[in-house]
Image: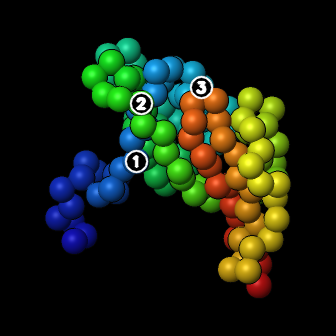
Amino acid sequence: MPGNSPAPAGWHVVTPRIVTPDPQGLVRFLQQVFDAEGAFHPGRPAELRIGDSWLMISGDDERDPMPAFLYVYVEDAETTFQRAITHGATSLEDPRDTPYGDRRAMVRDDWGNTWQIAHRQAG
């Protein structure tokens, strides 16, 4: 489908969207923890870029809150995990090696989203 994607340029066909009562707070958390690029805009979804992926954050004024469970590859799982904890996330799984080659941790943010934070190990 290269060149014929129905998605906007630079976007993937499937885009996660989180609906929360506090979109501004979640946007700030994602900027602090994952270096997300983008900004909160009242009255419309925030469009955030984390690495090569897009994520939309919306307020719950028109929809019921809907948290997400997302797997995010980062440069260093331990560093990102610690940043998440520093910014209020709760640890669900300390960093550990997985049988499929990822070093992975898991946190839940204050908005009810679960984030598995991983990096691929050499080998």
- Per the image, the residue denoted by label 2 is 65
Between label 2 and label 3, give the one nearer the viewer: 2
* Residue depicted at x 46% and y 52%: 53
For label 3, the SS is helix
The answer, for residue 109, to whether it is visible in the render is: yes
Q: Which amino acid does label 1 sit on?
A: Pro
Q: What residue type is labelled 3?
A: Arg
Position of 108 with respect to 37 (left or right) is right
Toward which corner of the image does residue 93 lie, by quadrant?
bottom right
Position of 8 with respect to 116 (left or right) is left
Distance, label 1 to label 2, CA atoms, is 14 Å
x%, y% of residue 15? 36, 50
For label 1, the SS is loop
Distance, label 3 to label 1, CA atoms, is 17 Å
- Per the image, the residue denoted by label 3 is 28
- Per the image, the residue denoted by label 1 is 16
N-term-proximal mark, 3 vs 1: 1
Q: Residues within 10 Å of mark 2 (few under 14, many from 20)?
A: some
Name the quadrant of the N terminus.
bottom left
* Residue depicted at x 17% and y 64%: 4
Front-most of residues 76 and 64 = 64
